Image (spheres, grey):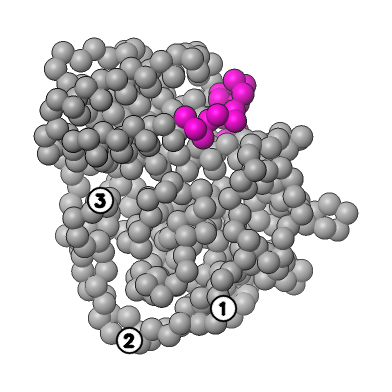
């Protein structure tokens, strides 16, 4: 009981720590539909514990504010109506002080519940809620970076810029053909989309020990990679032209020198650093240009046992689909992953912005192929 309570409290405190550098004005703006404000993340993660656990399992629980169920529900259709995602930045009221009061109220009631009635169901839901909050801690960082990048004075959030200095190794790893087991195994926490352990047959392949660096990608840019249709998927080419994409997100050419916005402010691009903020479209185009390909998520999972990973999320060439025997959980938590299994691509690994103890080699992250604002990069295969 004490272990899970301490775990819960430490993760909840970490969210507040991430917000310590913020000023009041930083909590509310929403710079894009995909980038939620810090205030919304703080409230939504509290709403999750209130909605999924306290309302059902805490006797005589009184909700903090009835309007919060509408304001801070993300995508759970079974729970009721919700604010449109694009309007999260319009929530100037309740104030951030009210949101911190809400967090304290939820924490107080969760602490009492965990101390008095730790059933298996409550334990499972609490661990899910903790991992859910860790996901939002990373999103808080990436969303905040996108918002700050829209500010012409390029504000500094912290000394940490979440950029990995350089690769630790080079060369290729050879994986022989064979049938391999894929998926999570064991009693440790994982999401439902990692279940359905199964076998896949893999042809022999090689995978790079090193991730693509900024210097590598600059060669692609200088070779007019963004202007040559032959490297791009058709959907990617339309995205490229419609959005006038000519470089990775946050890159800016100043007096002939590439700079990038980081959470430590605007900096010159370090050629040796690992490339970040690349869409699947760009990753696939670069791999084609370089004469290689992206690994499938199954190849990545098998090779990960021999790879140095965790500095950036790595695009794979796999669509986000259910594993064999995948089952959607009953109730609202069943909406967590399964209903998104269409039109998305899988990323594997973790990034420097990923919460501690929130990564494993079976973790299946997923985003649309145009996504750039996450700390995503490229590992090549052949």
Q: Is residue 259 magenta?
A: no
User: Measured from the top left, where is residue 150 in percent x and y?
Assistant: 68, 36
Q: In the figure, residue 285 lies in which quadrant?
A: bottom right
Query: In terms of secondary structure, where does tag 2 sit?
Result: loop
Q: Residue under label 2, please give it.
A: 177
Where is mark 1, residue-wise?
Answer: 170
Q: Position of residue 229 (x, y in %)?
A: 65, 68
Q: Which corner quadrant of the image does residue 348 belong to? A: bottom left
Residue 373, numbered circle: none
Spatial CA distance of label 3 from label 1 is 32 Å
Q: How many marks?
A: 3
Give the residue at x 59% y 59%: 164
Of the residues under marks 2 and 1, which one precedes in the sequence? Answer: 1
Q: Nearer the viewer, residue 257 or 285?
A: 257
Tell me the SS state at disc 1. Answer: loop
The residue positioned 18% from the left and 36% from the top of the image is 1
Numbered circle sitting on residue 189: 3
Q: Which residues are magenta?
A: 16-32
Residue lying at 41% horizontally and 53% vertically, measured from the top left: 366
Q: Quadrant of residue 72?
A: top left
């Amino acid at each position: 009981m004490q272990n899970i309570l301490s775990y819960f409290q430490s993760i909840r405190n970490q969210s507040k720590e991430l917000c310590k550098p913020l000023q009041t004005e930083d909590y509310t703006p929403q710079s894009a539909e995909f980038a939620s404000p810090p205030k919304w993340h703080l409230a939504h993660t509290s709403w999750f514990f209130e909605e999924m656990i306290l309302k059902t399992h805490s006797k005589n629980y009184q909700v903090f504010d009835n309007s919060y169920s509408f304001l801070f529900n993300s995508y759970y259709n079974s729970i009721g109506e919700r604010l449109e995602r694009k309007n999260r930045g319009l929530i100037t009221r309740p104030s951030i002080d009210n949101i911190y009061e809400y967090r304290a109220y939820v924490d107080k009631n969760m602490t009492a519940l965990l101390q008095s009635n730790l059933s298996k169901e409550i334990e499972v839901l609490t661990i899910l809620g903790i991992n859910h909050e860790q996901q939002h801690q990373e999103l808080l960082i990436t969303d905040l970076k996108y918002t700050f990048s829209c500010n012409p004075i390029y504000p500094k959030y912290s000394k940490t810029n979440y950029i990995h200095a350089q690769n630790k190794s080079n060369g290729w790893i050879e994986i022989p053909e064979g049938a391999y087991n894929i998926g999570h195994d064991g009693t440790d926490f994982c999401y439902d989309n990692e279940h359905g352990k199964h076998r896949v047959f893999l042809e022999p392949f090689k995978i790079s020990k090193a991730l693509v660096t900024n210097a590598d990608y600059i060669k692609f840019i200088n070779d007019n990679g963004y202007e040559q249709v032959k490297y791009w998927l058709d959907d990617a080419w339309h995205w490229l032209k419609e959005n006038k994409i000519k470089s990775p997100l946050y890159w800016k050419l100043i007096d002939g020198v590439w700079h990038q916005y980081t959470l430590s402010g605007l900096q010159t691009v370090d050629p040796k650093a690992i490339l970040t903020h690349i869409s699947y479209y760009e990753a696939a185009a670069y791999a084609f240009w370089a004469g290689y390909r992206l690994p499938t998520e199954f190849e990545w999972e098998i090779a990960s046992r021999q790879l140095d990973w965790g500095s950036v999320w790595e695009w794979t060439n796999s669509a986000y689909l259910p594993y064999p025997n995948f089952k959607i959980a009953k109730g609202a938590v069943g909406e967590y992953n399964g209903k998104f299994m269409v039109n998305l691509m899988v990323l594997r690994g973790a990034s420097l912005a990923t919460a501690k103890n929130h990564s494993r080699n079976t973790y299946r992250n997923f985003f649309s192929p145009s996504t750039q604002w996450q700390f995503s990069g490229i590992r090549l295969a052949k």
